[in-house]
Amino acid sequence: MILVPLLASARVALVRPSPPQETPAPDAPVTWKDLSRSGFPLRFYGFLRLDAYYDSARMNNIFTPFTVSPEDGTAADDDDAGFALDPRLTRIGVDITPGEIGETNVAGKIEIDFANFTSGSAESRPAPRIRVAYLDLSKHELGLRVGQDWDVVSPIYPAVNAETLMWNVGNTGDRRAQIQGRWGPKDSKVDLKAALALTGAITNEDLDSATPGLTPERDGFDSGLPNLQVRAGWKPAGPVEKKPLDLGAWGAIGKTETDTSFNGNKRFDVTLYGLDFTLPFTAALSARGEAWAGENLGDFRGGVGQSINPATGEEIGAIGGWAELVYVADQWRYHAGGTVDDPDDDEVPDARPDHNSALYVGTIKDWRSGMRTGFDVIYWDTNWANSEDGDGLRLNLYFQYNF
């Protein structure tokens, strides 16, 4: 008898309808706050790249070439060929674009690749390298940038040799820490840039580092001063079917200092002045290049990387530049040009380069959807003071996928 009420209750429970289930709320959209702590928008970019190099003569470095070694049987034999594959130029960058804060636009950028050569590391273990990393503020025609960026001087570079951009062979300028200001109204034909930047950031030169008992300090740092760079650009209005004419005049001054006296001198002047141009002839054909002169230019990639003559205590002067023609047709780009870096022969020590030049041709094929391939041929010639010269061909085939 006791089981009857229990069974009845169980039967009622079995037939009682289940309570309606709640419909799950739709997922909330992902916001920038979910992706970055600040909530500011980020934009990723970069490319995957592989370079193949063939050199018909021994370069100072097959990956980052600056000179052809003397073919004297000691530094290198005649026509000592080399081959290498290199993924180091693979790049990734992030643009930080928070928009306006009040009336000031604040943005930032960080960009890295893997071209940092670490002594003793395996070739398949390239290390990351900061290319640029800066904070940028702009309001109307004024701008301020602090961090690592490209030099204000020598703002363009040749189309070949992406590893070293023909530095020390005619192209000057690099990337370094700086405080950069700029002025340029949108409707103005003129723009101005100036920067206080770090001397010694490129060469890390310390000419008296071997002095016994001396606490080492790089010569640019030891000067106690930044270098000053200035550029004035002029870009007049032109036909919409052509890229505009772009002209620039620029200069830089600085100091380096050593603890040890070199022929009575411890402080040395750095000077660089030059011109850059981009000259369109038609919508497809243009010319571009730079010309410069100065002294103590190792840290600006001039004078074939040389600064002073330790024997005489004199700054090594040099002149140089580069020029190229560029033709763009649909998905193809063709370029041909030459470069030269010519230090003063009387100021260059023995067994050091006193002339460095190159001639080149190349092409880039844009396959669309981010894929491109390129091929360059560079004839490279380095003269050495009171030593055998070196010359050879450098072939560079690369594959690049942009994202």
Image: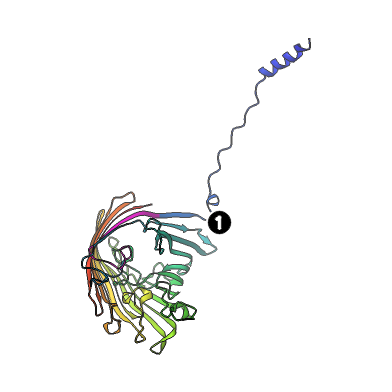
| Residue closest to the eye, 240 or 326 | 326
Q: Residue furthest top?
A: 1
Which image quadrant for residue 287? bottom left
Give the answer, above or below, for where 260 lies relative to 322. Answer: below
Which image quadrant for residue 325? bottom left
Give the answer, above or below, for where 385 lies relative to 334. Answer: below
- Name the side, left or right, on which 289 lies relative to 116: left
**Is residue 97 rendered magenta in the image?**
no
- Name the side, left or right, on which 155 lies relative to 55: right
Which part of the image, by quadrant, shows the N terminus?
top right
Q: Is residue 327 visible?
A: no
Q: Position of residue 298 (x, y in %)?
A: 36, 76
- Name the side, left or right, on which 149 lies relative to 245: right
Under circle 1, the secondary element is loop
Give the answer, above or below, for where 84 lies relative to 207. Answer: above
Residues rendered magenta in the picture? 46-64
Q: Position of residue 122 (x, y in %)?
A: 39, 58
Residue at image location 45% in from the left, 77% down from the top: 218
Q: How many marks?
A: 1
**Is residue 47 rendered magenta in the image?**
yes
Which image quadrant for residue 253? bottom left
Residue type at numbered disc 1? Ser
Q: Position of residue 215 (x, y in %)?
A: 50, 79
Q: Mark 1 = which residue?
A: 38
Q: Position of residue 86 (x, y in %)?
A: 33, 57
